[in-house]
């Protein structure tokens, strides 16, 4: 498994929680936002993560009627999800600083 794949797997939950923290979102919207940010994510990868986050009590969902087709399942972060996101963002900042120190100045 490549380092890119490993890093992506480890950061997707953080990114998903961050996007849902900003506003309620439906699955395909999340896929598009992640792709726009350079994280190519298939719906087959996203939905199992959302299901797991729901089982852990970090997100909830509600069906909302759509004017553009069938109802959409919108995901929303819970209070527990907000706390976990806060902890993960602190951890991400610490890891990011450490890695930056180690790789700073490497040129190819």
Image (cartoon, rainbow, N blue to C red):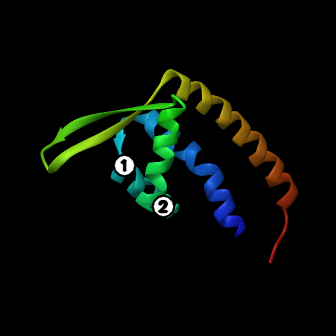
Residue at the far top: name it.
Answer: 79
User: Residue drawn at (51%, 28%), measured in percent from left and top?
Assistant: 57
- Indicate the position of residue 87 as horizontal and vertical percent values: 67, 30
Q: Name the foreground residue: 18 vs 102.
A: 18
> In 3D space, how far apart are the residues under numbered discs 2 and 1 (Cα atoms)?
11 Å
Q: Nearer the viewer, residue 99 or 106?
A: 99
Q: Is residue 24 above or below residue 47?
A: above
Q: Residue furthest bottom?
A: 108
Q: Most extreme residue toward the front, as rendered?
A: 55
- SS at mark 1 in the image: helix
Marking on residue 41: 2
Label 1 neighbour load within 10 Å: few <14, some 14-19, many 20+: some
- Using a 10 Å C-alpha cutoff, classify the residue at mark 2 as few (fewer than 14 neighbours), some (14 to 19) or many (20 or more): some
Say which of 18 and 47 sits in front.
47
Q: N-terminal of the two: label 2 or label 1?
A: 1
Q: Quadrant of the N terminus?
A: bottom right
Residue 59 image offset from top left, x and y in percent: 46, 32
Q: Secondary structure at mark 2?
A: loop
Q: Which mark is residue 27?
A: 1
Which numbered circle lies on residue 53? none
Q: Nearer the viewer, residue 55 or 14?
A: 55
- The answer to whether residue 63 is left or right of residue 88 is left
Q: Is residue 51 visible?
A: yes
Q: Position of residue 37 (x, y in %)?
A: 49, 58
Left or right relative to 94: residue 36: left
At x 67%, y 58%, the residue is 7
- Name the residue located 57 percent from the left edge and 50 percent from the top edge: 12
Residue 36 visible within the image: no
């Amino acid at each position: 498994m490549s380092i890119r794949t490993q890093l992506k797997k480890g950061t997707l939950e953080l990114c998903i929680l961050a996007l849902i923290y900003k506003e309620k979102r439906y699955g395909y919207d999340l896929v598009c936002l992640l792709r726009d940010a350079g994280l190519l994510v298939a719906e087959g990868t996203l939905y199992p993560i959302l299901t797991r986050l729901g089982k852990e009590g970090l997100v909830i969902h509600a069906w909302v009627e759509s004017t553009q087709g069938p109802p959409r399942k919108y995901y929303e972060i819970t209070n527990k999800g907000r706390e976990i996101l806060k902890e993960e963002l602190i951890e991400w900042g610490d890891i990011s600083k450490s890695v930056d120190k180690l790789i700073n100045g490497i040129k190819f």
